[in-house]
Image: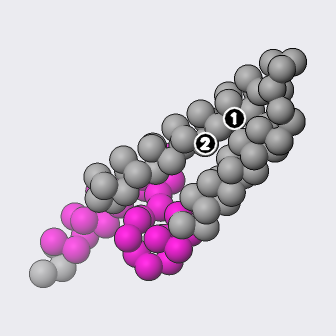
Amino acid sequence: MPPFIKYLVVFILAVIIYNLFKAFYHLSNRNSNRKEVVKSLALRVGLSLTLFVSLLFASYLGLIQPHGLLPIEKPIEQNINKSETK
């Protein structure tokens, strides 16, 4: 995965978390407007969905390669057998 995509994903996640805490601040503050809470939460949900769809699309196009937690390595026996048959 190119470093630009990694930095972009981390930046968008930071903006999502910022909007979550901004909504919490407006929710806990008695003097703030309820519209600010709804606006912050709607922006957070919109960014989350956009990030999810963008990651799926990038995976479909081959820009990013999904992998498991533990990559599977080829057994050593298969590599030895291939070299013996040549």
Q: Nearer the viewer, residue 69 or 50?
A: 50
When the figure is inspected, residue 4 is found, relative to residue 79, above or below; the finding is: above
Q: Residue furthest left?
A: 86
Mark 1 residue type: Leu
How packed mark 2 is, by other alpha carbons closer than 10 Å (few <14, some 14-19, many 20 or more), is many
Residue 52 visible: no
Q: Is residue 9 left or right of residue 39?
A: left
Marks 2 and 1 sit apart, C-alpha to C-alpha, by 6 Å
Element at label 1: helix
Using the rendered view, name the quadrant where residue 2 is placed: bottom left
Element at label 2: helix
Residue at (53, 64) in percent of width and height: 55
When the figure is inspected, residue 13 is found, relative to residue 79, above or below; the finding is: above
Circles 2 and 1, Cβ within 8 Å, touching? The answer is: yes
Q: Where is residue 9 drawn, in percent x and y?
A: 46, 50
Q: Where is residue 83 drawn, in percent x and y?
A: 16, 72
Q: Nearer the viewer, residue 7 or 80?
A: 7
How packed mark 1 is, by other alpha carbons closer than 10 Å (few <14, some 14-19, many 20 or more), is some
Residue at (54, 41) in percent of width and height: 15
Residue at (54, 67) in percent of width and height: 54
Residue 68 sits inside the magenta stretch: yes
- The quarter of the picture where the N terminus appears is bottom left
Q: Where is residue 27 drawn, in percent x and y?
A: 83, 26
Disc ID at residue 20: 1
Disc ID at residue 16: 2
Using the rendered view, name the quadrant where residue 79 is placed: bottom left
Using the rendered view, name the quadrant where residue 73 is placed: bottom left
The region drawn magenta spans 55-83
